[in-house]
Amino acid sequence: MREPPWMLVTHHQGDVSKAEVGVRAGGVIRRAPDELAGRTMLEVLGAWDELAPALRGLDPDRLDPVPGAVLAAPLLHPRKVLCAGANYYAHLTEMGVARPEGDVAPYFFFKPPTTSVIGPDDAIVLPDRAGRKIDWEVELAAVIGRRCVDVPVERAYEVVAGWTIVNDVTSRDLLERSDAVAPPFGHDWVLAKAGDTFCPLGPGIVPSWMVGDPQDTALRLSVNGVVKQDSSTTDMVTPIDRLIAAASRAVTLEPGDVIATGTPAGVGFPRGDFLAPGDETLAEIDGIGALRNHVMEREDVSWAR
């Protein structure tokens, strides 16, 4: 997959509490330009309209490398993580769902921004539960750079500061509940989607003007080097501009919100193929980058952490 010329990242040198905004280009993490220095990524996104003109002319070669820099999630704590479900035709087919006809209203769910989000090379921690079925889902995600509500479809891309990758890790064994109080409550999206570490995010944020057509972009996910998902955003049921518009009707969008746009075919559930300790996932999107994470057992099972 093609790497972007550069991306905005969050990095540290061993202490994530001292994380800073920087620029990654050619695999090298560099100091932030003066306009961004001392700001968090949320603050950068909150001033996106002011900062974007300077960033358009950024030359990363003029920025000093950061010795020993370690990538963190570009947004350590997004304001909201809003995910679109069932949004690729081929994914619906593999899940045994009939192809929808005509315009389809998108379906959204949330992931907790402070406990589910992890960054590049962080661990996806498996829950300590018998019969767990933990699945992967590569997704293109829009990062919002403007507070907005009721956005017209034709202006939806104007509120996008940039793009990143989300791996929507999912507990397939918890989605359907046999103990629900009534059939309408038989699907539990919180238990299935909101687990700790279940939202790998990164490696950075690629500004919107550097991504040609997000609606015609290749994306892929492999586990231990074996390709599981290999598709394009052209297969989406609801296009990205309509997703963003719909999301802005459901909730006020704010700078630092992340909207994940759904996953293509190739998830593990239809084949009974799930994540195990020692696995490594690699989620890639053309022009956005690659997000690598390893999988491990949960070690601390105490009730207070």
Image (tube, rainbow, N blue to C red):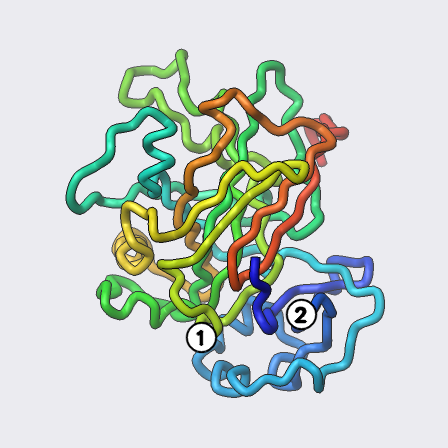
What residue sits 63% from the left and 26% below the top? 127
User: Where residue 299 appears, x then y in whole percent?
Assistant: 76, 29
Q: Nearer the viewer, residue 124 or 49?
A: 124
State the residue in front, 168 or 291: 291
Residue at 56 percent across and 52 percent down: it is 284
Spot occupied by residue 238 in the image (x, y as percentages of width and height): 28, 49
Q: Is residue 275 left or right of residue 264?
A: right
Q: Is residue 208 above or below residue 84?
A: below
Q: Does residue 6 lie above or below 246 as drawn? A: below
Distance from Cα at disc 2 to Cα at disc 1 = 17 Å
Residue 273 occupies which quadrant of the picture?
A: top right
Q: Earlier in the sequence, mark 2 or mark 1?
A: 2
**Secondary structure of residue under mark 1:** helix
What label sits on residue 93 in the rendered view?
Answer: none
Label drawn at residue 209: 1
From what the image shows, is residue 69 above or below residue 296?
below
Position above or below: 17 against 96: below
Position of the N terminus, as image quadrant, is bottom right
Question: What residue is disc 2 on?
Answer: 24
